[in-house]
C-alpha cells in the first residue's frame, strides 16, 4: 500500500473539550485538546483535524485561543473547521497557526467563498467538509452539524467544490459516524472516483482493519479517525505497522 496514504486523528471540540458522539449526537467528554493533540503527533499522525462542532449552530466563530494553543504544540499540519463564514475568518484561523481551513455549511450557503478563499490563500489551504447520507438511493448533502438535509446531490456537490478551487474533500458518512461499523465504502468510492482532488474518508472507523479496507477498496487519500484512537483501542503507530 502506498505510503502517501495519511492517517488523520480528528478532535471534535465542544466547550473547550474533545468530545465524541454517535450519528452526530450523544456527546461524551474525552479530554484536553492540547494534550490529545500532542499525544497523536507523538504516535505518528500525519495531520490533525480540529472541528468546533457547535460553532455554526451557536452562530459564533471558532475558539481562536484554543486553536493557537493546539497549533503551538504541533509540527504536523492542522486543519480547523467550525463557524467559518468569510475570507476574513479564513485569515484569522490561518493566523492562529492552522495549516488548512475546513468549511461545510458556509460552502453550501455561499459557494463563492470556496473560490475566494482558494484565490486568496491557495487551493491547498481550502478543505470542503461534506456530510453525506443515503436518501432514497441518492447521496444527499447535510449541513448544520448533520441537522439539515439540503437536498443537494453529494456527487454533484463535490465536483462543483473541486471546480471552485477546493484542495480537498473531507467526506463524512452520517450513517457511519461514531458507529464503529466501518467506513461507508460505496459512498467514499463514488466520491473519490468523481473528483481528482484528495478525499479524506470519515465516519464509522472501529478497527485498524476498517482503515486498511477503505484504502484498499476506494481511491481515498486519507482516513480520519476518532473513536478508535480516543478510546485507546489502537494507536496511530498500530495502524501504520499493519499497513
Image (spheres, grey):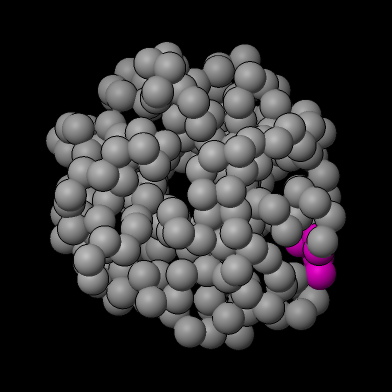
Q: Residue at x 34, y 56 (%)?
A: 132
Along the viewing direction, whichever of 137 and 187 lies nearer the viewer? 137
- Judge from the rendering whether residue 169 lies leftward or rightward of residue 207; answer left or right: left
Along the viewing direction, whichever of 114 and 118 lies nearer the viewer? 114
| Relative image position of residue 243 (x, y in whole percent) | 70, 80
Residue 77 can be seen in this image: no
Q: Which residue is drawn at 62% across and 15% down?
A: 65
Magenta span: chief secondary structure: helix
- Judge from the rendering whether residue 179 lies leftward or rightward of residue 73; answer left or right: left
| Relative image position of residue 177 (x, y in whole percent) | 53, 54
| Relative image position of residue 50 (x, y in whole percent) | 58, 37
| Relative image position of residue 106 (x, y in whole percent) | 28, 32
Residue 85 sits in quarter: top left
Along the viewing direction, whichever of 157 and 116 lies nearer the viewer? 157
Can residue 149 be found in the magenta stretch?
Answer: no
The magenta span reads 234-238
- Judge from the rendering whether residue 44 lies leftward or rightward of residue 184; answer left or right: right
Q: Is residue 223 above or below residue 214?
A: above
- Judge from the rendering whether residue 217 lies leftward or rightward of residue 147; answer left or right: right
Q: Which residue is drawn at 51% across and 49% down?
A: 23
Along the viewing direction, whichever of 112 and 106 lies nearer the viewer? 106
Residue 84 can be seen in this image: yes
Residue 189 sits in quarter: bottom left
Can residue 235 be found in the magenta stretch?
Answer: yes
Amino acid at each position: 500500500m502506498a505510503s502517501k496514504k495519511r492517517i488523520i486523528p480528528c478532535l471534535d471540540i465542544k466547550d473547550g473539550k474533545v468530545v465524541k458522539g454517535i450519528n452526530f449526537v450523544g456527546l461524551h467528554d474525552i479530554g484536553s485538546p492540547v494534550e490529545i493533540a500532542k499525544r497523536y503527533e507523538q504516535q505518528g499522525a500525519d495531520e490533525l483535524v480540529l472541528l468546533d462542532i457547535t460553532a455554526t449552530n451557536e452562530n459564533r466563530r471558532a475558539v481562536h485561543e484554543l486553536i493557537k494553543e493546539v497549533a503551538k504544540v504541533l509540527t504536523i499540519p492542522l486543519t480547523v473547521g467550525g463557524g467559518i463564514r468569510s475570507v476574513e475568518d479564513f485569515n484569522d484561523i490561518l493566523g492562529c497557526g492552522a495549516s488548512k481551513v475546513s468549511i461545510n455549511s458556509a460552502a453550501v450557503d455561499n459557494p463563492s467563498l470556496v473560490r475566494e478563499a482558494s484565490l486568496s490563500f491557495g487551493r491547498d489551504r481550502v478543505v470542503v467538509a461534506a456530510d453525506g447520507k443515503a436518501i432514497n438511493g441518492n447521496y444527499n448533502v447535510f449541513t448544520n452539524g448533520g441537522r439539515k438535509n439540503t437536498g443537494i446531490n453529494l456527487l454533484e456537490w463535490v465536483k462543483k467544490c473541486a471546480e471552485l478551487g477546493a484542495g480537498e474533500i473531507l467526506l463524512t458518512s452520517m450513517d457511519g459516524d461514531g458507529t464503529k461499523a466501518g467506513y461507508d465504502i460505496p459512498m467514499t468510492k463514488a466520491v473519490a472516483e468523481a473528483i481528482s482532488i484528495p478525499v479524506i474518508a470519515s465516519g464509522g472507523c472501529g478497527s485498524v482493519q476498517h482503515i486498511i479496507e477503505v484504502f484498499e477498496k476506494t481511491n481515498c487519500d486519507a482516513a480520519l479517525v476518532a473513536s478508535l484512537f480516543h478510546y485507546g483501542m489502537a494507536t496511530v503507530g498500530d495502524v501504520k505497522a499493519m499497513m
